[in-house]
Image: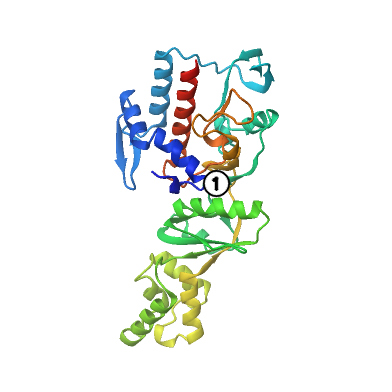
Amino acid sequence: MEAADFWAAGSPFVRRVLRAFPAARAAAFFREIGVALHEEPGGKLFPDTNRARTVLDALLGEASRRGVSVETSRRVTAVARDGPGFRLGTASGIVAARRVVLATGGLSLPKTGSDGAGYAFAASLGHTLVPTTPALAPLVLEGGFHAPLTGVSLEAEVAVHAAGRKPVRIRGPLLFTHFGVSGPAALNASRFWHRARAEGQEVRVTVSLLPGERFEDLEAWLLELVKSRPRLGIEGALALRLPAAVAEGVARELGLVGTALGRLRREERRAVIRSVVDRPLLVRDSRGYAFAEVTSGGIPLSEVDPATMESRLCPGLFLVGEVLDVDGRIGGFNFQWAWSSAFVAASALAAVS
Protein backbone atom coordinates (compact mmCIF):
# COMPACT_ATOMS: atom_id res chain seq x y z
CA MET A 1 0.00 0.00 0.00
CA GLU A 2 1.53 3.28 -1.18
CA ALA A 3 0.59 6.96 -1.37
CA ALA A 4 -0.01 6.35 -5.09
CA ASP A 5 -3.07 4.31 -4.11
CA PHE A 6 -4.67 7.59 -2.98
CA TRP A 7 -5.86 10.51 -5.08
CA ALA A 8 -4.77 13.17 -2.55
CA ALA A 9 -2.81 16.02 -4.06
CA GLY A 10 -0.52 16.03 -1.01
CA SER A 11 1.00 12.58 -1.48
CA PRO A 12 4.10 13.30 0.70
CA PHE A 13 1.66 13.92 3.56
CA VAL A 14 -0.14 10.65 2.87
CA ARG A 15 3.13 8.75 2.50
CA ARG A 16 4.36 9.95 5.88
CA VAL A 17 1.16 8.97 7.68
CA LEU A 18 0.99 5.53 6.03
CA ARG A 19 4.59 4.79 6.99
CA ALA A 20 3.79 5.48 10.63
CA PHE A 21 1.26 2.64 10.70
CA PRO A 22 1.52 0.52 7.53
CA ALA A 23 -0.88 -2.19 6.40
CA ALA A 24 1.27 -4.99 7.80
CA ARG A 25 1.20 -3.41 11.23
CA ALA A 26 -2.57 -2.93 11.01
CA ALA A 27 -3.02 -6.61 10.14
CA ALA A 28 -0.82 -7.62 13.07
CA PHE A 29 -2.87 -5.43 15.41
CA PHE A 30 -6.14 -7.04 14.37
CA ARG A 31 -4.68 -10.52 14.81
CA GLU A 32 -3.48 -9.51 18.28
CA ILE A 33 -7.01 -8.52 19.33
CA GLY A 34 -8.47 -11.78 18.06
CA VAL A 35 -9.45 -11.12 14.44
CA ALA A 36 -8.11 -13.99 12.30
CA LEU A 37 -7.49 -12.76 8.76
CA HIS A 38 -7.12 -14.31 5.33
CA GLU A 39 -5.93 -12.80 2.07
CA GLU A 40 -8.13 -12.76 -1.02
CA PRO A 41 -7.19 -12.04 -4.66
CA GLY A 42 -5.77 -8.56 -5.09
CA GLY A 43 -4.16 -8.59 -1.65
CA LYS A 44 -7.34 -7.75 0.28
CA LEU A 45 -7.49 -8.96 3.87
CA PHE A 46 -10.78 -10.13 5.36
CA PRO A 47 -11.72 -11.62 8.73
CA ASP A 48 -12.03 -15.39 8.50
CA THR A 49 -15.66 -15.03 9.57
CA ASN A 50 -16.33 -12.70 6.60
CA ARG A 51 -18.39 -10.58 9.00
CA ALA A 52 -17.79 -6.89 9.68
CA ARG A 53 -19.28 -7.45 13.12
CA THR A 54 -16.21 -9.50 14.04
CA VAL A 55 -14.00 -6.45 13.54
CA LEU A 56 -16.38 -4.13 15.40
CA ASP A 57 -16.72 -6.46 18.38
CA ALA A 58 -12.95 -6.88 18.61
CA LEU A 59 -12.36 -3.11 18.55
CA LEU A 60 -15.02 -2.46 21.18
CA GLY A 61 -13.60 -5.23 23.30
CA GLU A 62 -10.07 -3.82 23.10
CA ALA A 63 -11.33 -0.33 23.92
CA SER A 64 -13.13 -1.68 26.99
CA ARG A 65 -10.03 -3.61 28.08
CA ARG A 66 -8.00 -0.40 27.95
CA GLY A 67 -10.54 1.58 29.93
CA VAL A 68 -12.01 3.63 27.08
CA SER A 69 -15.53 4.92 27.72
CA VAL A 70 -17.83 4.87 24.68
CA GLU A 71 -20.89 7.04 25.21
CA THR A 72 -23.21 6.34 22.29
CA SER A 73 -26.14 8.28 23.78
CA ARG A 74 -24.30 11.62 23.83
CA ARG A 75 -24.26 12.80 20.23
CA VAL A 76 -22.06 15.86 19.78
CA THR A 77 -23.95 18.77 18.21
CA ALA A 78 -21.34 21.56 18.46
CA VAL A 79 -17.65 22.09 19.21
CA ALA A 80 -16.44 25.48 20.45
CA ARG A 81 -13.18 26.88 21.75
CA ASP A 82 -13.17 27.44 25.50
CA GLY A 83 -9.87 28.99 26.59
CA PRO A 84 -7.08 26.45 26.04
CA GLY A 85 -9.63 23.64 25.70
CA PHE A 86 -13.02 23.00 24.15
CA ARG A 87 -16.69 22.95 25.01
CA LEU A 88 -18.77 20.22 23.37
CA GLY A 89 -22.48 20.61 23.00
CA THR A 90 -24.29 17.27 23.28
CA ALA A 91 -27.86 16.06 23.38
CA SER A 92 -27.53 15.72 27.15
CA GLY A 93 -25.54 18.82 28.06
CA ILE A 94 -22.12 20.46 27.82
CA VAL A 95 -18.88 18.45 28.05
CA ALA A 96 -15.49 20.07 28.65
CA ALA A 97 -12.47 18.66 26.83
CA ARG A 98 -8.76 19.49 26.76
CA ARG A 99 -8.38 18.09 23.26
CA VAL A 100 -10.73 16.95 20.51
CA VAL A 101 -10.26 14.42 17.71
CA LEU A 102 -12.59 14.73 14.73
CA ALA A 103 -13.04 11.16 13.45
CA THR A 104 -16.52 11.76 12.10
CA GLY A 105 -16.18 10.36 8.59
CA GLY A 106 -17.61 12.17 5.58
CA LEU A 107 -21.01 12.08 3.92
CA SER A 108 -20.93 8.62 2.35
CA LEU A 109 -23.24 5.83 3.52
CA PRO A 110 -25.35 8.13 5.76
CA LYS A 111 -27.18 5.11 7.20
CA THR A 112 -24.00 4.48 9.20
CA GLY A 113 -24.27 7.93 10.82
CA SER A 114 -22.01 9.90 8.47
CA ASP A 115 -23.84 13.19 8.12
CA GLY A 116 -20.96 15.60 7.47
CA ALA A 117 -21.11 17.13 10.95
CA GLY A 118 -17.33 16.99 11.24
CA TYR A 119 -16.96 19.48 8.41
CA ALA A 120 -19.18 21.97 10.23
CA PHE A 121 -17.28 21.46 13.50
CA ALA A 122 -13.94 22.06 11.75
CA ALA A 123 -15.28 25.14 9.95
CA SER A 124 -16.52 26.62 13.22
CA LEU A 125 -12.96 26.31 14.53
CA GLY A 126 -11.39 28.13 11.58
CA HIS A 127 -10.84 25.44 8.95
CA THR A 128 -11.72 25.66 5.26
CA LEU A 129 -13.25 22.92 3.16
CA VAL A 130 -12.43 21.42 -0.23
CA PRO A 131 -15.93 20.88 -1.74
CA THR A 132 -17.06 17.32 -1.17
CA THR A 133 -18.41 14.80 -3.68
CA PRO A 134 -19.28 11.10 -3.60
CA ALA A 135 -16.47 8.72 -4.57
CA LEU A 136 -16.39 4.98 -5.19
CA ALA A 137 -20.03 5.14 -6.25
CA PRO A 138 -21.81 3.15 -9.00
CA LEU A 139 -22.54 5.14 -12.17
CA VAL A 140 -26.05 5.74 -13.52
CA LEU A 141 -26.17 5.69 -17.34
CA GLU A 142 -28.46 7.01 -20.01
CA GLY A 143 -29.65 4.69 -22.78
CA GLY A 144 -30.69 1.06 -22.78
CA PHE A 145 -27.53 -0.88 -23.61
CA HIS A 146 -26.72 -1.80 -20.01
CA ALA A 147 -30.07 -3.06 -18.68
CA PRO A 148 -30.24 -6.35 -20.66
CA LEU A 149 -26.68 -7.09 -19.51
CA THR A 150 -27.46 -6.84 -15.78
CA GLY A 151 -25.13 -9.15 -13.87
CA VAL A 152 -22.57 -9.49 -16.69
CA SER A 153 -19.00 -8.62 -15.69
CA LEU A 154 -15.85 -8.24 -17.75
CA GLU A 155 -12.40 -6.68 -17.62
CA ALA A 156 -12.53 -3.15 -19.02
CA GLU A 157 -10.74 0.18 -19.10
CA VAL A 158 -12.79 3.26 -18.20
CA ALA A 159 -11.45 6.66 -19.27
CA VAL A 160 -12.61 9.98 -17.79
CA HIS A 161 -12.02 12.91 -20.17
CA ALA A 162 -12.19 16.33 -18.49
CA ALA A 163 -11.69 19.40 -20.66
CA GLY A 164 -8.08 20.54 -20.76
CA ARG A 165 -6.73 17.54 -18.86
CA LYS A 166 -5.07 14.27 -19.69
CA PRO A 167 -7.65 11.46 -19.57
CA VAL A 168 -7.66 9.35 -16.42
CA ARG A 169 -7.67 5.68 -17.39
CA ILE A 170 -8.74 3.03 -14.90
CA ARG A 171 -8.60 -0.68 -15.65
CA GLY A 172 -10.44 -3.38 -13.77
CA PRO A 173 -13.64 -5.42 -13.57
CA LEU A 174 -16.79 -3.67 -14.84
CA LEU A 175 -20.24 -4.90 -13.83
CA PHE A 176 -23.37 -4.04 -15.82
CA THR A 177 -26.45 -3.32 -13.71
CA HIS A 178 -30.07 -2.34 -14.27
CA PHE A 179 -29.17 1.33 -13.64
CA GLY A 180 -25.75 1.50 -15.32
CA VAL A 181 -22.36 0.15 -14.28
CA SER A 182 -20.59 -0.80 -11.07
CA GLY A 183 -17.51 -2.84 -10.21
CA PRO A 184 -14.01 -1.51 -9.39
CA ALA A 185 -13.43 0.24 -12.74
CA ALA A 186 -16.67 2.24 -12.51
CA LEU A 187 -16.34 2.93 -8.78
CA ASN A 188 -12.82 4.31 -9.12
CA ALA A 189 -13.81 6.38 -12.17
CA SER A 190 -16.77 7.94 -10.36
CA ARG A 191 -14.42 10.01 -8.23
CA PHE A 192 -12.92 11.75 -11.26
CA TRP A 193 -16.29 12.31 -12.92
CA HIS A 194 -17.62 13.98 -9.77
CA ARG A 195 -14.47 16.06 -9.19
CA ALA A 196 -14.57 17.38 -12.77
CA ARG A 197 -18.24 18.28 -12.41
CA ALA A 198 -17.63 19.97 -9.05
CA GLU A 199 -14.91 22.08 -10.67
CA GLY A 200 -17.20 23.11 -13.53
CA GLN A 201 -15.34 21.07 -16.15
CA GLU A 202 -16.95 19.48 -19.17
CA VAL A 203 -16.49 15.75 -18.74
CA ARG A 204 -17.23 12.62 -20.73
CA VAL A 205 -16.55 8.96 -20.03
CA THR A 206 -15.60 6.19 -22.42
CA VAL A 207 -14.86 2.51 -21.97
CA SER A 208 -12.87 -0.12 -23.80
CA LEU A 209 -14.45 -3.55 -23.44
CA LEU A 210 -11.16 -5.05 -24.65
CA PRO A 211 -8.57 -3.16 -22.59
CA GLY A 212 -5.19 -2.85 -24.25
CA GLU A 213 -6.61 -3.61 -27.70
CA ARG A 214 -6.02 -0.92 -30.34
CA PHE A 215 -8.54 -0.04 -33.03
CA GLU A 216 -6.11 -1.12 -35.75
CA ASP A 217 -5.41 -4.49 -34.16
CA LEU A 218 -9.09 -5.33 -33.73
CA GLU A 219 -9.81 -4.33 -37.31
CA ALA A 220 -6.99 -6.53 -38.55
CA TRP A 221 -8.37 -9.44 -36.51
CA LEU A 222 -11.87 -8.99 -37.97
CA LEU A 223 -10.49 -8.81 -41.53
CA GLU A 224 -8.66 -12.09 -40.96
CA LEU A 225 -11.93 -13.63 -39.74
CA VAL A 226 -13.67 -12.38 -42.88
CA LYS A 227 -11.22 -14.45 -44.91
CA SER A 228 -11.51 -17.62 -42.84
CA ARG A 229 -15.15 -17.48 -41.69
CA PRO A 230 -17.09 -15.03 -43.89
CA ARG A 231 -20.48 -16.47 -42.90
CA LEU A 232 -19.91 -16.03 -39.18
CA GLY A 233 -22.35 -13.49 -37.71
CA ILE A 234 -20.89 -10.36 -36.16
CA GLU A 235 -22.22 -11.28 -32.70
CA GLY A 236 -20.58 -14.69 -33.03
CA ALA A 237 -17.30 -13.09 -33.99
CA LEU A 238 -17.36 -10.69 -31.05
CA ALA A 239 -18.29 -13.54 -28.72
CA LEU A 240 -14.85 -14.99 -29.42
CA ARG A 241 -13.43 -12.07 -27.42
CA LEU A 242 -16.33 -10.83 -25.26
CA PRO A 243 -19.09 -12.34 -23.12
CA ALA A 244 -21.81 -13.55 -25.50
CA ALA A 245 -24.43 -11.22 -24.03
CA VAL A 246 -22.19 -8.19 -24.56
CA ALA A 247 -21.36 -9.28 -28.11
CA GLU A 248 -25.06 -9.62 -28.90
CA GLY A 249 -25.77 -6.25 -27.27
CA VAL A 250 -23.24 -4.49 -29.50
CA ALA A 251 -24.67 -6.13 -32.62
CA ARG A 252 -28.24 -5.34 -31.59
CA GLU A 253 -27.43 -1.71 -30.84
CA LEU A 254 -25.97 -1.26 -34.34
CA GLY A 255 -28.77 -3.18 -36.06
CA LEU A 256 -26.37 -5.89 -37.19
CA VAL A 257 -27.71 -9.03 -35.46
CA GLY A 258 -27.34 -11.94 -37.85
CA THR A 259 -25.19 -9.97 -40.31
CA ALA A 260 -22.38 -12.15 -41.65
CA LEU A 261 -18.84 -10.81 -41.45
CA GLY A 262 -18.48 -11.08 -45.21
CA ARG A 263 -21.45 -8.73 -45.71
CA LEU A 264 -20.26 -6.00 -43.37
CA ARG A 265 -19.56 -2.68 -45.05
CA ARG A 266 -16.38 -0.84 -44.03
CA GLU A 267 -18.23 1.82 -42.04
CA GLU A 268 -20.28 -0.85 -40.25
CA ARG A 269 -17.14 -2.79 -39.31
CA ARG A 270 -15.55 0.37 -37.95
CA ALA A 271 -18.68 1.28 -35.98
CA VAL A 272 -18.51 -2.15 -34.35
CA ILE A 273 -14.87 -1.64 -33.40
CA ARG A 274 -15.51 1.83 -31.95
CA SER A 275 -18.41 0.43 -29.93
CA VAL A 276 -15.99 -2.06 -28.39
CA VAL A 277 -12.76 -0.11 -27.84
CA ASP A 278 -13.98 3.49 -27.50
CA ARG A 279 -17.53 3.17 -26.27
CA PRO A 280 -19.20 6.27 -24.76
CA LEU A 281 -20.57 5.77 -21.25
CA LEU A 282 -23.37 8.32 -21.05
CA VAL A 283 -23.13 9.09 -17.33
CA ARG A 284 -26.17 10.85 -15.94
CA ASP A 285 -24.97 10.77 -12.34
CA SER A 286 -23.67 8.38 -9.72
CA ARG A 287 -25.87 6.72 -7.12
CA GLY A 288 -24.68 9.39 -4.70
CA TYR A 289 -23.64 9.40 -1.08
CA ALA A 290 -26.17 6.71 -0.15
CA PHE A 291 -24.13 4.16 -2.14
CA ALA A 292 -20.68 5.82 -2.22
CA GLU A 293 -18.01 4.00 -0.23
CA VAL A 294 -16.09 7.18 0.55
CA THR A 295 -16.29 10.97 0.35
CA SER A 296 -13.86 12.99 -1.78
CA GLY A 297 -12.90 16.45 -0.54
CA GLY A 298 -12.80 17.67 3.04
CA ILE A 299 -10.36 19.54 5.27
CA PRO A 300 -7.23 20.55 3.26
CA LEU A 301 -4.06 18.69 4.23
CA SER A 302 -2.18 22.00 4.34
CA GLU A 303 -4.15 22.84 7.50
CA VAL A 304 -2.94 19.73 9.39
CA ASP A 305 0.46 18.65 10.75
CA PRO A 306 1.28 15.19 9.30
CA ALA A 307 3.55 14.39 12.25
CA THR A 308 0.67 14.59 14.74
CA MET A 309 -2.59 15.12 12.75
CA GLU A 310 -3.07 18.26 14.88
CA SER A 311 -4.70 21.29 13.33
CA ARG A 312 -2.31 24.07 12.33
CA LEU A 313 -5.14 26.55 12.90
CA CYS A 314 -6.64 25.35 16.18
CA PRO A 315 -4.19 23.83 18.71
CA GLY A 316 -5.64 20.84 20.53
CA LEU A 317 -7.85 19.83 17.61
CA PHE A 318 -6.88 16.65 15.74
CA LEU A 319 -8.38 15.50 12.43
CA VAL A 320 -8.25 11.93 11.10
CA GLY A 321 -9.77 9.68 8.47
CA GLU A 322 -12.36 10.65 5.90
CA VAL A 323 -12.96 14.15 7.25
CA LEU A 324 -9.67 15.09 5.55
CA ASP A 325 -9.19 15.69 1.83
CA VAL A 326 -7.85 12.19 1.20
CA ASP A 327 -9.56 9.37 -0.68
CA GLY A 328 -8.15 6.23 -2.21
CA ARG A 329 -9.06 3.63 -4.75
CA ILE A 330 -11.25 0.67 -3.87
CA GLY A 331 -9.64 -2.22 -2.01
CA GLY A 332 -9.41 -1.30 1.67
CA PHE A 333 -7.17 1.74 1.20
CA ASN A 334 -9.61 4.16 2.82
CA PHE A 335 -9.84 1.91 5.88
CA GLN A 336 -6.05 1.94 6.10
CA TRP A 337 -5.97 5.73 5.85
CA ALA A 338 -8.41 5.92 8.77
CA TRP A 339 -6.30 3.56 10.88
CA SER A 340 -2.96 5.15 10.01
CA SER A 341 -4.08 8.73 10.60
CA ALA A 342 -5.78 7.71 13.87
CA PHE A 343 -2.57 5.99 15.02
CA VAL A 344 -0.54 9.14 14.36
CA ALA A 345 -3.03 11.29 16.28
CA ALA A 346 -3.25 8.80 19.18
CA SER A 347 0.53 8.63 19.43
CA ALA A 348 0.73 12.42 19.59
CA LEU A 349 -1.98 12.58 22.24
CA ALA A 350 -0.29 9.89 24.33
CA ALA A 351 2.97 11.85 24.22
CA VAL A 352 1.39 14.96 25.78
CA SER A 353 -1.08 13.34 28.19
Q: Which secondary structure, mark 1?
A: strand
- Which quadrant would residue 65 be assigned to in this image? top left
Q: Nearer the viewer, residue 285 or 295?
A: 295
Compared to residue 291, the image places residue 153 above or below, namely below
Residue 83, image x, y percentages: 68, 16
Compared to residue 301, the image places residue 9 above or below, namely below
Colouring chosen for the image of the structure: rainbow
Total labels: the figure holds 1
Compared to residue 234, the image places residue 241 above or below, namely above
Residue 295, image x, y percentages: 56, 41
For label 1, count other residues whose C-alpha is less than 10 Å away and answer few (under 14), some (14-19) or many (20+): many
Compared to residue 118, the image places residue 189 above or below, namely below
Q: Residue at x 60, y 31 (%)?
A: 312
Q: Nearer the viewer, residue 336 or 349?
A: 349
Residue 85, image x, y percentages: 63, 17
Q: Residue at x 47, y 15 (%)?
A: 68
Is there any visible trace of residue 162 in the rendered image? yes
Residue 15, image x, y percentages: 44, 41
* Left or right placement of residue 189 versus residue 223 in this view: right
Q: Nearer the viewer, residue 295 or 23?
A: 23
Is there any visible trace of residue 177 in the rendered image? no
- Which quadrant would residue 32 be assigned to in this image? top left
Say which residue label 1 marks: 135
Q: Nearer the viewer, residue 141 or 33?
A: 33
Q: Residue at x 44, y 81 (%)?
A: 259
Q: Residue at x 52, y 71 (%)?
A: 253
* Left or right placement of residue 294 versus residue 235 in this view: right
Three-letter code for the amino acid on which mark 1 is drawn: Ala
Quadrant for the N terminus in the image: top left
